[in-house]
């Protein structure tokens, strides 16, 4: 298209170098935690931080952190809370979104605006009352309480995205279905939900990431170590590093919380990027 | 039951349970948060005194509040510059400058956006770690004596040290947002500009910038909102607001007041302050940036 001059090739070389440097900045901390998870304290203290872990690699750091540091428990708690909250949030948001998108009724716009507006409000404002609410309901320090809160936190995003999604489905679908004698419920569960699968997957993946990574609510609402999720557990572990220093297991634990996220990211990249864009554009 | 009642019942069943649930766990705590901010309350059941605006008056005389607000806007300012600046640069680089490996860069740069703040905080804690950290070891390669700067423990460095992780974590998202919007610009525009001999820089300021302004605006607002509403998490993980409140932001101060010192009323007033400031800031920015679009078009 345009002539490559010497100046422009120097420029693109410089830009290339900057991009590669940034890629290193992004990847290096992850690589370093892989290295770190296979080292012992000696290697942390005496060797350079970028040195390779020594042979034999200390895979037992993973076993150690899984059992002795209870990361296994945190992992299972995270998994359980994430799956249940995501399913609940999808159920609650898809039903409301469907009705708002495809039926006319009084207050539907107000309902939509309520969910939309709540996305702009800093959640931390509700942190203290939420803590006392869960205590009053005898749900503090329980995974069930955490599930309720995480579900509620993810409903408005789901409503917002799925209303847009249900609006794009052709109107004739539900008309012909109701002529066939299907009830409104049947139309929703048998026709609309399957058609909305791409939207549900997008929203679901975003919910999974949000919940798996959530820290603030968790750390306030859960004080019982047997109920910690991974982010809470890892934050506590790192705070305890001041008293008992075992970097290897810490990085092993850190990796155990990152790996599922990376796997999900590489499978659902498109949904994740478009989901985040949808959340920001509001 | 006739058809109409059935339909009404259906709408009721599909909206009201969600709404009640949402109100109980989202709306009620937010309203209750505003309400509690008018009380002197330690969290226990024995005393909860209505004190009107006293918590708000007390904030005016609390030097840490002023400092925390300053820190929040310090982060907002530098994060907008860093994240939107780098994100735009990278987006232009992989689209307009036709660099090889664009897909790879996009994929990699986005990774920090999907990590938990806890993970980001822990990773960067060990980059900054004075004795075993990467940064000091790296700097020591070039100096005679071992560098032993305590980045997060020194008031002079702590606030600045919070910026790299915060920027690191956001760039990829802005890049992805802008790449999509640049790819939507008709190629003919750039072809015509090339024929007219416009430089890459001119093409950027005359074509790319104006036509992606909507997305740049969204990115700026996204950074501002997420920073004012959520910057305290990285602060809390990395410094807990220390040393000596040097890195305190509004959210971390709220957390400390509420859950460390049990001034629930005062903490709630800080929450209200966060709400007010974040709404004012986003509304003001939206106004300012709307005027900009008019000028450009």
Image (cartoon, rainbow, N blue to C red):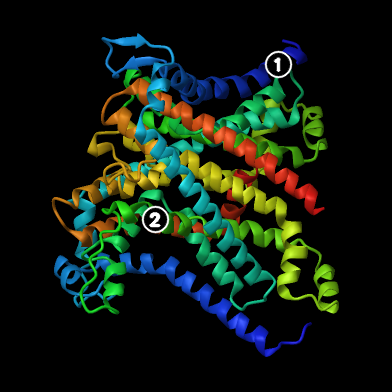
Q: Can the viewer see residue A233 in this picture?
A: yes
Chain letter for the residue marked with disc 2 in the picture = B
* Residue A143 occupies quadrant: top left
x and y, in percent, of residue A27 in the image: 42, 68
Judge the density around disc 2: few (<14), some (14-19), many (≥20) Cα neighbours within 10 Å: some
x and y, in percent, of residue B41 in the image: 32, 16
Distance CA(mark 1)–CA(mark 2)? 57 Å
The answer to whether residue B96 is above or below residue A152 is below
Give the number of the mark in front: 1 or 2. Answer: 2
Q: Residue at x 43, y 12 (%)?
A: B52
* Residue of label 2: B160
The answer to whether residue B1 is above or below residue B245 is above
Of mark 1 and mark 2, the one earlier in the sequence is: 1
* Residue B187 occupies quadrant: bottom right
Chain letter for the residue marked with disc 1 in the picture = B
* Residue furthest bottom in the image: A6
Q: Residue at x 47, y 29 (%)?
A: B273
Q: Can the viewer see residue A34 in this picture?
A: no
Judge the density around disc 1: few (<14), some (14-19), many (≥20) Cα neighbours within 10 Å: few
SS of the residue at dot 2? helix
Q: Which mark is residue B8?
A: 1
């Amino acid at each position: 298209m345009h002539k490559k001059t010497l100046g422009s090739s120097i420029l693109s070389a410089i830009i290339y170098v900057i991009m590669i440097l940034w890629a290193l900045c992004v990847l290096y901390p992850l690589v370093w935690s892989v290295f770190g998870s296979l080292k012992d304290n000696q290697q942390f203290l005496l060797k350079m931080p970028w040195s390779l872990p020594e042979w034999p690699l200390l895979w037992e750091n993973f076993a150690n952190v899984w059992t002795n540091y209870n990361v296994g428990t945190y992992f299972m708690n995270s998994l359980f809370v994430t799956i249940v909250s995501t399913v609940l949030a999808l159920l609650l948001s898809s039903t409301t979104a469907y009705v708002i998108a495809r039926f006319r009724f009084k207050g539907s716009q107000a309902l939509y605006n309520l969910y939309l507006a709540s996305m702009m409000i800093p959640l931390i404002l509700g942190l203290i009352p939420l803590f006392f609410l869960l205590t009053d309901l005898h749900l503090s320090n329980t995974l069930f309480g955490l599930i309720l809160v995480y579900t509620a936190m993810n409903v408005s995003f789901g409503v917002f995205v799925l209303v847009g999604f249900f609006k794009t489905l052709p109107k004739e679908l539900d008309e012909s279905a109701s002529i066939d004698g299907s009830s409104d419920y049947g139309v929703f569960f048998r026709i609309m939900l399957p058609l909305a699968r791409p939207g549900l997957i997008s929203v679901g993946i975003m919910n999974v990431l949000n919940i798996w990574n959530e820290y603030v609510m968790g750390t306030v609402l859960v004080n019982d170590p047997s109920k910690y999720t991974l982010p809470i557990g890892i934050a506590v572990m790192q705070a305890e590093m001041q008293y008992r220093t075992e970097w290897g297991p810490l990085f092993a634990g850190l990796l155990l919380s990152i790996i599922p996220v990376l796997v999900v990211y590489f499978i659902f990249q498109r949904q994740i990027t478009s989901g985040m864009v949808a959340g920001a554009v509001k | 039951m006739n058809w109409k009642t059935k339909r009404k019942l259906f709408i009721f069943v599909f909206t009201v349970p969600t709404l009640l649930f949402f109100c109980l766990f989202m709306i009620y705590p937010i309203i209750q948060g505003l309400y509690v901010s008018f009380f002197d309350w330690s969290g226990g059941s024995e005393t909860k005194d209505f004190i009107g605006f006293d918590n708000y008056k007390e904030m005016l005389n609390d030097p840490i509040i002023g400092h925390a607000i300053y820190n929040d806007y310090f982060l907002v300012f530098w994060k907008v510059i860093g994240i939107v600046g780098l994100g735009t640069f990278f987006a232009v680089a992989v689209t307009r400058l036709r660099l090889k490996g664009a897909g790879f860069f996009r994929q990699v740069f986005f990774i920090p956006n999907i990590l938990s703040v806890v993970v980001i905080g822990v990773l960067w804690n060990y980059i900054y770690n004075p004795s075993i950290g990467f940064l000091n070891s790296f700097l020591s390669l070039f100096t005679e004596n071992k560098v032993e700067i305590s980045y997060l423990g020194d008031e002079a460095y702590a606030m600045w040290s919070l910026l790299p992780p915060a920027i690191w974590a956001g760039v990829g998202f802005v890049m992805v947002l802008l790449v999509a919007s640049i790819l939507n610009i008709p190629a003919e525009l750039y072809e015509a500009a090339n024929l007219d001999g416009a430089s890459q820089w001119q093409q950027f300021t005359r074509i790319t910038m104006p036509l992606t302004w909507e997305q740049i605006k969204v990115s700026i607002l996204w950074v501002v909102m997420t920073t004012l509403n959520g910057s305290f998490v990285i602060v809390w993980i990395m410094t807990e607001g220390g040393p000596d409140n040097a890195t305190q932001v509004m959210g971390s101060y709220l957390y400390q007041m509420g859950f460390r010192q049990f001034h629930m009323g005062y903490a709630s007033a800080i929450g209200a302050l966060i709400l007010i400031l974040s709404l004012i800031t986003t509304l003001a920015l939206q106004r300012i940036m709307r005027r900009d679009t008019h000028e450009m078009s």
